[in-house]
Image (cartoon, coloured by chain):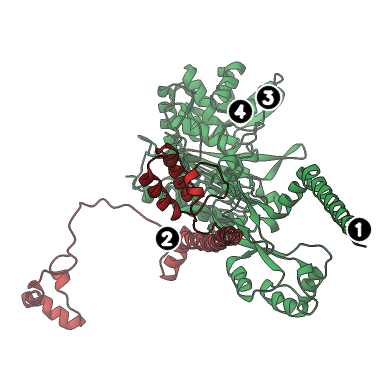
Chain colours: A red, B green
Amino acid sequence: MSVLATDRKLNIRAETAPPTSPNRVAAVAHRVRRLPRRRTPGGALPGAVMIPVARRPGLATLVLVAILGVLFYVAQSAGATQASYEIHALQGERQRLLAEQEQLTLQLARTASVNQVDAAAGALGLSHPGRWEPVAAAPAAIALAPEPGQAASAPASSGWMSILADLVGRPTYAAASGR
Amino acid sequence: MPEARRLRVLWLMALALLLTLVLQARLIYWQVGHHRELWAQAHAQHEQRVQLPAARGRLVDRNGLVLASNTPVYSIFATPDQISERAKPKVVETLAPILQMSEQEVRNRLDSTVKFVYLKKRVPAAVAARLDALHLEGIGKLRENQRAYMAGATPGTTLAHQLLGFVNDGGHGQYGVEGFYDEQLRGRAGFESTLRDLTNRPIILSDHVRVAPIDGADLTLTLDSQLQYFVEQALAAGVKRTEAEGGSALVIQPRTGEILAWASSGGYDANAFRTTDPARFVDPILAHLYEPGSVMKVVTLAGALDTGAISPLTPYSDSGWVRVGGITIWDWDRRPHPKGNMTYVLEQSLNVGAVKVEQLLGKENFLHYLHAFGFGALTGVDVAGEVTPALNRPDWRESELATASFGQGVAVTPVQMLTAVAAIANDGKLMWPHLVASSRDPSTGAAKAVAPRVVRQAIAPEAAKQMRAMMVSVVEKGSGSRARMDNFKNRVFGKTGTAEIPENGAYSKDRGIASFVGCMPVEDPKFCALVIIRKPKPIPDQPLATEGAVAAAPVWKEIAQAIVLQQRIN
C-alpha cells in the first residue's frame, strides 16, 4: 500500500511539473526509474512512459505475498488455538487448586470443630467437673518463674523448710515463698 | 478435421462449464439456501455450553466456627463406545477396586449400549485423582459440590443437624436453615459457551461467552457451637438417665431473641442424609406440638398481673379440686391448700389456682394474653418447617379454657413456649426468635446484620418484673428446687411443667412430658432455656421421677452451669 501511495504522489508531482523543463523531466524520470512501474497505465506520467524502467511485479510475487499472508494467518490461528489449550490446561489446574483449597479449608474446620477439641481433651484425660462452685477471689499476679538471681538464693532461706524438703525429697521453696 | 477437433474442444468446454455451473448451483443451494440450518448444525457440533455452578454459602456460628461448608466430589462416568473391546478387561480390572465396586458391576455398565453411563457418583477427590493418573480410555469425571457438616456430640450425628437441615443431591436446601435460606445460600449458576475441537478440547480464544456464577451468601448464625455441643451432650445424658423416649433443649437470649443452642435427641448424620429415615428430618422444636403443662401457668398468671386482677400477694386458698364445665380438676397433690397467695400458687404449681386466675381474667382476656405471648401464630423463626395450631376458634368450652390455664388441652411448640417466657425476662417485650445474625455477600464482602425485632409488648414491664420474682420463688421454695445454683441464690427464675400425653382420646397416666423453663440472672437475664424430656420412664418407688422438676430441671441446671462458665456470668 505504501509503495502505491508514493507512486501516486509522484504522479501528481509529475503532472503538476512544467513539461517544458528538461531538467525537471529528467529528475522525475530518474526517480520513476527507481520505482516499480504501475500495472495499469493511467496516463498520469506521460514523460515516464517512454523511459525503460525496472521489471513489473510479476504474478509470482503476488502469489508469494498471498501465500505468505495466508501462512501468517494460519500461524496466528494455530498460535491462538495453542494458547487456548494452554489456557484450558491452566484453568483446569486452577480448578484443581481451588478444589484442594476447599478440601483443606474443610479439613481445618473439622480440626477446629468442638467435637475434635472435646476428643482431644478426653484423650488428655480432661473431663467436665461433676460439681462446681464459683469461688470469689481477689485478682493477684501469678509469678510463673523465680527472678534471675533469686533461684540460687531461694533454697538458702531454708530453715525448717529445707529440713522438710530433705524429708519429702522435693524442693519446697515455691511453697515457702507463698505461691 | 481441425474443424471437428475444434468442435470437440468446444463441447468439452461447454460440458466443463455445465459441470461448473451445476456445482456452483449446488453450492449456492447449500450455502445460501440452507445457510441458517447448516450454521445451526455446525454450531451445535462445535459449540459447547457448560454450566458453571455457584458455590453455596457457608454457615458459621457466632464465633466464626464453620458449621456447614462445601467439599468437591466427583462423579465418575464412562463413554462405553470409546472403550475398545481389547481394553475393556483391563479397564474393568483397574476400576473395580478403586471405585469399590464388583468387577461384574463395572462390566455390566461398560457393556451398556448407551453413550454415557455413570459408574459411581460423588466419590472423594482422592479417588478421582487416582483415576486421573491412570488415563483410562473412555473414563471421565464430573466435578460436583457436596455439603459437609461438623460432627455432633453424640455418635452418628452432626452438630445441630435438625436446625441446619441438609442439601440434597440436586443442590437444594432441605429443612432447617438450609431450607429456609436456600435461595440466598444457593446463589446463581453461570455458564460458559466455547467452540470445541475434534478432540473436544475448548478453544477459549474463539467465540467465547462466559457469564460468571454468583456465589451464595455466607450466613453467620447466632448459634454458639461450643454451647450447642454441650447442650446436645447434656440432653443426650438426660434422656439416657431418665430412659425417656426423647427430648429437646433450646437456649435463647431474651433481650435480642437470638437463639444460642437448639438440640433434639434422635438425630441423624446430615452428611449421610441419603440413608436416613425421613422421619428424623422433622424438627420437634418447630414441628412437634406438645401440651406444655404447668409452664403455661406463667402465661395465665402474667396476664392476670398485667390486668391487675391479682398481685403476687393476693390471698389464695383451695380445697384441692374444682369442678368446671362438668369436669373435676385436681391439684397435683390432691390436697387442700387453705392458706397461701398467688406466689404460692406458682411455687406449688396448683392447677386449681390457675383455673381460678383464668376465671378471674375471663375468656376474652385469657385468650388475649395467649395471643399476646405469641400462641396461635407462627413465631417467624428463620428455620423451615414451623407449624402452629390456631387458637382463635369460637367454640372454646369452659372446661377447655380451665385446662388451658395450666397447659393441658392446648398445644404449642417448644419455640413458642420459650419465646413467651423470654418475654417475661425481657420486661414484657416479645422478641422475634431468630438464627441468622448476619449475611455476607461473597462478591462484595459486605456484611448485612440482622437487627433484633420486637414483636409486641405482651405485658407491662412492672407485671413482668412481678412474674420474674414469683418465678424466683418457684426455684428457691417450690417445684424448681433442682435448678438452684450455687452462688446464684435468688437469681434464677423458672417454672416446671409436667403434661400428660393424649393417646387414643384419653390422657396417658404413666408417661408424660416433663419440662423446665428458666432464665438467669434475674436482675439482667442473659439467657433463657427450655428443656423437654418426652416420656421419661416411671420409677416405682419415685413417684416424681417423671415430673419436670426431677426429669428436666437437672438437665437445665447442667446447661445453665455451662453457660455461666462460658459467658462468665457472675
- Mark 1 belongs to which amino acid? Glu
Kindly report the distance in space between the C-alpha atoms of the residues bearing marks 2 and 4: 40 Å
Tell me the quadrant of the picture where the C terminus of chain B can be found.
top left
Q: Quick check: B175 above or below B13?
A: above
Q: Residue at x 41, y 31 (%)?
A: B469
Left or right of B167 in this view: A128: left
Front position among marks 3 and 2 = 2
Front position among marks 2 and 1 = 1
Front position among marks 4 and 3 = 4
Task: Residue A138: tell me if it is visible.
Answer: yes
Task: Residue B543: tell me if it is visible.
Answer: no
Left or right of B143 in this view: B503: right
Asked if marks 4 and 3 touch (Cβ < 8 Å), the reply is no
Chain for disc number 2: A
Marks 4 and 3 on same chain: yes
Rate crowding at label 1 as few (under 14), some (14 to 19) or many (20 or more) other CA atoms within 10 Å: few
Chain for disc number 4: B
Determine which residue is flagged by label 1: B3
Q: Residue at x 60, y 57 (%)?
A: B203
Q: Position of residue B439 (x, y in %)?
A: 47, 41
Element type where label 1 sits in the image: helix
Instruction: Name the disc covering residue B377, or none.
Output: 4
Instruction: Name the disc covering residue B399, or none.
Output: 3
Kindly report the distance in space between the C-alpha atoms of the residues bearing marks 2 and 1: 120 Å
Rate crowding at label 2 as few (under 14), some (14 to 19) or many (20 or more) other CA atoms within 10 Å: few
Asked if marks 2 and 1 touch (Cβ < 8 Å), the reply is no
Residue closer to the observer: B329 or A42:
A42
Sooner in the amino-acid sequence: mark 1 or mark 3:
1
Kindly report the distance in space between the C-alpha atoms of the residues bearing marks 1 and 4: 110 Å
Q: Quick check: B337 above or below B436?
A: above
